[in-house]
Amino acid sequence: MTDLRTGLGEAVGAAFADLGLPADLGRVTASDRPDLADFQSNGALAAAKRAGKNPREIAAAVAEVLKADPRLASVEIAGPGFINLKVADAALASRADEIAADPRAGGELVAVPRRVLVDYGGPNVAKPMHVGHLRSSIIGESIKRLYRFRGDVVVGDAHFGDWGYQMGLLIGAVTDETPAIAAEVARLNAAADLPADWQRLEPEAFQAIELADLDRLYPEAAAKGKADPAYRDRARKLTAELQAKKPGAYLLWRRFAKVTQAALERDFHALGVDFDLWKGESDVDHLIEPMVRELDEKGLLVEDQGARIVRVAREGDKRELPPLLVVSSEGSAMYGTTDLATILDRRQTFDPELVIYCVDQRQADHFEIVFRAAYLAGYATEGQLEHIGFGTMNGADGKPFKTREGGVLKLNDLIEMARSKARERLHEAGLGEDLPAEEFEDIAGKVAVAALKFADLQNFRGTSYVFDLDRFTSFEGKTGPYLLYQAVRVKSLLRKAEGEAAEPGPVTVTEPAERDLVLTLDAFDAALTEAYDKKAPNAVAEHAYRLAQSFSKFYAACPILIAEPPVRASRLTLARAVLRQLEQALDVLGIAVPDRM
Ligand code: ARG
């Protein structure tokens, strides 16, 4: 199935070819002047330039050929040689029937599906989340869904940050605070009689540690580590002990990771973000030693002031890229080391053809360094690893958003804040108030998520934007709640039709609002393709908004339930197609629609 734009592009291309001109000049785009035409081709201008001819003459010749195409109501030449195309009502109607019958709502599959891994979210044990993690989660989730919808085999991995220096800091802080835990760590470290599967033990003394303890202790420890070299050295030593799997340090760390992951999974789920894999940096620990050996054998490893590095600078680099730090002078694996080993791990377990790292733009150099090292080592081929960065979500002060209490962005707090605003908005609009309390809560949750996600995804990811919950949660304007409201409106219309036993039927197109709606429905695949190619979900967000607007105009101009049966049947089919496509587009954005409000 092809959309009108593609189908007409082929016809225009064939017309060019008929005249001995290159067929690829036939590309067709949506018209710049929707009042005059539906589509346009600018190919005659380029053709004329190449052949040294008059563009209007070429356009006229092409138009002559196209006039025979039954899909076109008119073909006109405008300005210096644009070819303006107006689609026949019957062609629009049959395209609408096609979309309405398509479970994919007009969204095509890629020709050759790939195995794609999306690395996103990237939360850390203990270290608080910041807006970078939030945006990564929202954008990454959408890219995962988009790629999956297009037919790729996609795995989303949180790449949990659980193996770095912050773990040493935390082990220090927790043992300092609670002597009983310190004693248990020491006992385990020294124990000679641990069972073979000791890594699965859950020592009693560690069970009292909760996420709140880590949240409380970490900021202090991090600050001390910055100020006090001795404290920092000890944290580094403890990190090395952990990485050497000393039982006390290791089992304490297991407790940290467990309580953190449980809380994060719950909070992410509330945001409609669900990872297929919760693999962490620690999961590739066993690969590091052989990897370091291999890097050495390949002659890539260089000694540098007690550390071991891989140089990745290339001739012609505009600025000097630092080397990849593989083993620190304390003997620890670093952030880049685990990333490199993770490339190996993924190759062994999933063998992705493409890995998309959806991480804060500020880590662009980090990824460039890791990728280059991976290419040098032969762990991936150029182009297989791709970092897609993004800007920040800022506060009113123009700096990265922080909660009122300062500093820490707790996902849970953010969602709660959005939820309470959503409740307020629903009350203001008189929505959902007659529904059972539990359902109202569910709706408020969906409105909150739609507000946060749509506000983020409607911008190109590279753009920074300002956090403004009042605006995000409004039911008017270009917002998530507006889209939910429109989708719910269609649902309730369709329920009503069902109640009146009004059946959908073949589409006929007569009114301008119907034409516009079908053309918008037809543009879905182009939006998906753009989003996919540019890894830019904002194209889908834009389409969802246009579709909702187009439906709204149609609904105002074209009575449905009170129309004559054949017209009513046609309009019900259109409404059904709109709902399916809108829900699909929102699903790609990670936004779920309630049944009613
Ligand atoms: N945990 C990291 C951080 O908080 C983000 C991880 C991103 N993914 C990766 N493969 N490095 O900065």
Image (tube, rainbow, N blue to C red):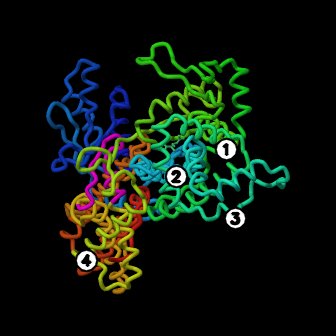
Asked if the residues shown at circle 4 and circle 1 are in contact, with their CB atoms under 8 angstroms apart, the answer is: no
Q: Residue at 46% x, 49% y: name it.
A: 220
**Lower sequence index among marks 4 and 2:** 2
Q: Residue 204: which numbered mark, if any?
A: 3
For label 3, count other residues whose C-alpha is less than 10 Å away and answer few (under 14), some (14-19) or many (20+). few
Dot 3 falls on a residue whose secondary structure is helix
Residue holding disc 4: 427
The amino acid on which the numbered mark 1 sits, given as a three-letter code, is Leu
Q: Residue at 32% x, 72% y: name it.
A: 490
Check the image and report above or below for 501 versus 521: below
Residue holding disc 1: 242
Quadrant of residue 94 within the rendered picture: bottom left
Q: CA distance from mark 3 to mark 1?
A: 19 Å
Which residue is more in the foreground, 215 or 555?
215
Q: Is mark 3 within 8 Å of ligand 1?
A: no
Asked if the residues shown at circle 3 and circle 1 are in contact, with their CB atoms under 8 angstroms apart, the answer is: no
The amino acid on which the numbered mark 3 sits, given as a three-letter code, is Glu
Which residue is more in the foreground, 222 or 302?
222
Dot 2 falls on a residue whose secondary structure is loop
Q: CA distance from mark 3 to mark 4?
A: 48 Å
Q: CA distance from mark 4 to mark 2?
A: 37 Å
- For the C terminus, the image quarter is bottom left
Q: CA distance from mark 4 to mark 1?
A: 52 Å
Residue holding disc 2: 126
